[in-house]
Amino acid sequence: MAATNGIRVYTQLVDKAAHDVELFYSRRGNGPIYRWSYEAARQHWRVLRMHLSDFATHELCLASWKSVPDELQTQLAQHYVE
């Protein structure tokens, strides 16, 4: 995956039909994992720093950069400013 600044983006291996919210996860290097959820009412991606005890990392699947919405790509680039 060709991501900006070495950012890896993941989706969770869950039944999407069971969830109303689209979720993505991001990580750069060995840094923390962040969960990104879209808030339709605010038309904004909300970010939350995750603790590894909150979920099983083996449930994450590497996402293609093309599958990441443009607005989220922009927020990711701003979030990971060096």
Image (spheres, rainbow, N blue to C red):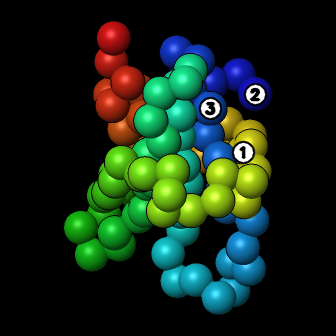
Q: Residues within 10 Å of mark 2 (few under 14, many from 20)?
A: few
Residue at the limit of the structure toward the left, as seen here: 42
Q: Which of pointers 1 and 3 lies earlier in the amino acid sequence? A: 3
Q: Quadrant of the N terminus?
A: top right
Determine contact: label 2, label 3, CB under 8 Å.
Answer: yes
Instruction: Indicate the secondary structure of the residue bearing disc 2.
Output: loop
The residue under label 2 is 1
Q: Quadrant of residue 59?
A: bottom right
Instruction: Indicate the secondary structure of the residue bearing disc 1.
Output: loop
Q: Is residue 76 above or below residue 29?
A: below
Q: Describe residue 3's horizontal placement relative to residue 36 as left or right.
A: right
Q: Amino acid at mark 2?
A: Met
Q: Quadrant of residue 15?
A: bottom right
Determine contact: label 1, label 3, CB under 8 Å.
Answer: no
> Alpha carbon of mark 1 to alpha carbon of mark 3: how far?
8 Å
Q: Residues within 10 Å of mark 1 (few under 14, many from 20)?
A: some
Residue at 66% in and 52% down: 57
The residue under label 3 is 8
Q: Amino acid at mark 1?
A: Ala
